[in-house]
Image (spheres, helix red, strand yellow):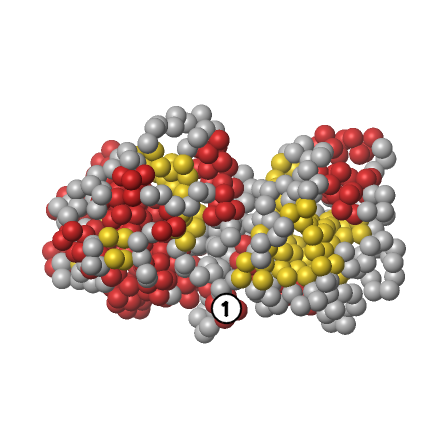
Amino acid sequence: MCGIVGYTGPRQASRILVDGLKRLEYRGYDSAGIAVQVDGATGAPPVVIKRTGKIAELRQAVPKDMAGHCGMGHTRWATHGGVTGENAHPHTDASGKVAIVHNGIIENYMALKGMLEKQGVPFRSETDSEVIAHLVALNYEGDLEAALKASLKHLKGTYGIVCVHADEPGRIVGARNGSPLVVGVGDGEMLLASDVTAMLAHTKRVVYLNDGEVVTMLPHEFRISDGDERRVDPRIDHIAWELEAIEKEGFSCYMEKEIFEQPDSIERAISGRMDHENGCAKLGGLNLSKKELHGIERVRVIAAGTSWHAGLVGCQLLESVARIPAAAELASELRYRNPVLEPASLYFAVSQSGETADTLYAMREVRRRGGTVLGICNVVGSTIARESEGGVYVHSGPEIAVASTKAFTSQLAAFYLLALEFARMHDMSHHEGQRFLAALREVPAAVRKTLAVRDHVQALAKKYCRHADFLFLGRGILFPIALEGALKLKEISYIHAEGYASGEIKHGPIALVSPETPSVFLVPGDHLREKTISNMKEIKARGGPVIALADEDDELVASIADDFIGLPKVDPRFQPFTMVVPLQLFAYFCALELGRDVDQPRNLAKSVTVE
């Protein structure tokens, strides 16, 4: 959601801050601002500039020659209070000497605000974040770190906080509880951000803060302490991404680029993890012995949004291929449901960012109850990756567009490997394991071939994008892909769409069928093909337009559908990879036709780090 970047060092802070915020645009925001300390004027309040709207408007408001070598910036995604200049960050205390930025939600801010107002403290905004600036000012006695730590004792909720004080030039203090903060270690300069993309142009050496930790930094040094005032020895990680990986590289937007990166990102997800000789997967990061894995009797997936859809596919695979009972849980529901943890169960927390609040909190609840949780994440060093007991990195590379595409198919790849790992311990023979791996090895090439439908899908988007409602229908392992297709269309084009299991249409959804409501059918190449064709005919009989995706040689499906998208033929178990790509493209081109902001759709954020 919101983005944070801080800088202290020899260079012009304002430029680094605005550029860093620009790289955080993909997280979603509605306003932005910076606060920069005044050089050579100890005691002078930091200069604060903030604007609603896009980073470009903030950039225009910041003088090109703005002095100052220490400061912080923020992109806000509104939670408490409307989208106004007053509610934008940074926030200051009454004197202007303390400036803070904050990601997260302070749950008890109304009580704190009431207490401060009784002491005569004036408030300028409607936000929960402003109370932090006033608390720090109230607790300040010449030591900003001590003042922030004293203030944290009064806060309930989640936060990533960064603050500066006019009386301490060059010093930045940050604290984390449930909202990510990363230290960037440069050469004579230090950075602090909510996401490594904000600092990648300046350093690849980073330290991920854990919950309860506070960092204090000057240009040449930093120190981290925990809630018990103990100093923490930092572990410096190296970011493998190159700066070019977060550029558009000739594509019109990030989503288009990421759709077309999928053959390579899937290849990275499976590379080095296939033992062809033995027909097995190689997943050493699970941190479980073969004996421990063999003792697992059921699997549960914890996830949200697109990651939940990947989990639904994974669970179908685990049951059909590995014969292990599996179910995918919505993280936002699991945490509050007082779940029953069954013995011999293994949980997977799935999140692209590794910071999804609902998934993280649900994972912690399962671990508190004694459950074993492994992570499936893209971002190395993320909170879920660090707090889980092992897992799988999907290696998608940075995903900038809010609507996830390549991370989804990489998560699928991880689940296919997991299903094979379990299957080879149970019913799957050596020969069948080799066949499964051979089919998986062909997936990147099949997806690359699938991308050739681009122009055809664009034409269909032009034809159908003015319709107000869509149905996406699939059976078996393609049902979650129907859900994902509907979600993508909703997310970026704002067209209402619903995903259903094809066999369920006669139990209610068929009432929606009309010439104004197209139905998108995902036709499998297995035993469910004929059943799906029957469902298509039910829609056609009631005047509903049908768009069908099926094997490119399926002449019967092509003859029934109003519009047909032929796809390269693959093992039916692997059709989720080829089926989802045209749905991503369809959503993308519909959004373009309707003039939507594809990479930053309204009301959405890339990483949902608050409840």
Is residue 585 among what the camera can see? no
* Label 1: few (<14), some (14–19) or many (≥20) C-alpha neighbours in 10 Å: some
Task: Using residue 294 as the reference point, say whether residue 51 is left or right of it.
Answer: right
**Where, quadrant-wise, is the C terminus in this rendering?**
top right
- At 69% across and 52% down in the image, what residue appears? 223
Residue situated furthest bottom in the rendering: 250
Where does the image place residue 461, in percent across and percent down from the top left?
A: 34, 60
Which residue position holds label 1? 242
Where does the image place residue 3, in percent across and percent down from the top left?
A: 61, 54
Vertical order, 528 against 325 (above or below): below
Who is closer to the viewer here, 589 or 80? 80
- At 28% across and 35% down in the image, what residue appears? 295
Who is closer to the viewer here, 397 or 24? 397
The image quarter containing residue 505 is top left
Task: Using residue 223 as the reference point, say whether residue 530 is left or right of it.
Answer: left
- At 72% across and 70% down in the image, what residue appears? 11
Task: Using residue 268 as the reference point, say whether residue 427 is left or right of it.
Answer: left
Q: Secondary structure at mark 1?
A: loop
Where does the image place residue 325, in percent across and percent down from the top left?
A: 26, 35
At label 1, which amino acid type do we have? Glu
Vertical order, 445 against 152 (above or below): below
- At 38% across and 65% down in the image, what residue appears? 261
Who is closer to the viewer here, 373 or 127? 373
